[in-house]
Amino acid sequence: MTSDGVVIVGAGQAGFQVAASLRMEGYEGPIALIGDEPGLPYQRPPLSKGFMAGKQAIADTALRPALFYQNHRIDLITGARVTAIDRVSRSVRLASGRDYHYEALVLAVGARNRTLRVAGADLDGVRYLRSDTEAVDIQQRLEHARNVVVIGGGFIGLELAAAARTLGKSVHVLESQPRLMPRVVSPILSDFYRDLHIGQGVQISLGAALSEIKGNQGKASQVVLSYGSVYPADLVLVGIGVVPNIELAGEAGLGVLNGIVVDQYLRTADESIYAIGDCADHPNPFANPLTGGRARIESVQNAVDQAKCIAAAIVGRPEQYRAVPWFWTDQFDIKLQMAGLSGGFGQVVTRGELESRKFSVFYFRDGRLAAVDSVNRPGDHLAGRKLIGAGTGISPEQAADASVDLKSLR
């Protein structure tokens, strides 16, 4: 069994940042960073963006080179799966049988893809994107594919659709809901992105209920909808959301809901155990109060900021997590930057003209600014983040008036 220190389970963005931030905070104890994937920790966002479009090499997604971990005395254990947490002895057990003892344990176990539950979902050619190896596989398959069907009209699905169409493939997006990206944007943006993709030659079907995937000699060849429509597909890309990895925490007796339950300091019910990133269900001052003011956020910003918060807590400077959430997506030549959480909004106003492809959507909840979505307007995004974080009392009329300098509002 190893000596006491900080054990981090999960070597994605969140886990890596905890280890790096601990050293930046002056922590001198042992740090073990345990990941179940075989290689160096890497960035996930480029997998569906720059890498898939052929603009970035997979090696360039590494968060740091191998020497970084050696120089910072971070014990990086890759290709290793943690199977149990013993809260009495304060240790975790790996599938190999090795134990790691901890003073503080950080669960950065992330999430996994939600999978299809239809006939033919296991055919060759039905692929999901979460890891770098999956990204490489999809990119190689795209070279030979002619007809690509994307199931899911969220961020990942639309980013993959844009990449495939840019490569000249025939692309059809199937979304079960009545509009694109329904969980995260207003109808204004849903319609804008539908028109954007259609203008680029992507076919889109909304309210599409999947029936089955048919194959030929074990390989996907058609996607069939419940009302009988059939679409040819030699590659089916699935992006229907993720499921947080809560099992390890649940088996250890920790609270789990829509993720691993933590308090405003990102601690579980066991004060020596923290949870962060995609797997953490945390109090968030920017979340919809009607949902209990809690959120589970899947973003690089959230992972990085929560990691820094925990590192500070471990070295004796605990602070409540209050960072403004922000996100982005790149599709074709359009960048959407999002600040805040728009769920439960009551009023929406736009700033700028949609036809110019440079505009922002401001969301108000109970008369207060809750979120800002900016299309090719980075200044609005940065100003919106500051306004939301400061709780500035901007009115819908001010938001919609392009003559009002958002940076001047306090």
Image: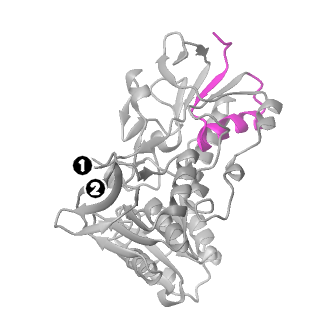
Q: On residue 119, which mark appears?
A: 1
At mark 1, the secondary structure is: loop
Q: Residue at horizontal 60%, vertical 23%? A: 104
Which quadrant holds the C terminus? bottom right
Judge by depth and name the residue closer to the eye, 166 or 6: 166
Q: Is residue 341 visible?
A: no
At mark 2, the secondary structure is: strand
* Among the two numbered marks 1 and 2 on one chain, the one whose residue lies closer to the N terminus: 1
Please state if 285 lies on the left or on the right of 105 as rendered.
Answer: left
Judge by depth and name the residue closer to the eye, 394 or 314: 314
What's under tag 1, amino acid-wise? Ala
Q: Position of residue 126 (x, y in %)?
A: 39, 52
The magenta-colored residue range is 1-29
Judge by depth and name the residue closer to the eye, 373 or 365: 373
Q: Position of residue 263 (x, y in %)?
A: 47, 36
Please state if 209 lies on the left or on the right of 389 as rendered.
Answer: left
Q: Position of residue 44 (x, y in %)?
A: 58, 51
Q: Residue at horizontal 42%, vertical 48%? A: 295
Quarter assignment of residue 35: top right
Q: Is residue 132 visible?
A: yes
For the residues labelled 1 and 2, the Cα–Cα distance comes to 6 Å
For the residue carrying disc 2, how many other residues have a C-alpha within 10 Å: few (<14), some (14-19), or many (20+)? many
What's under tag 2, amino acid-wise? Ile
Quarter assignment of residue 229: bottom left
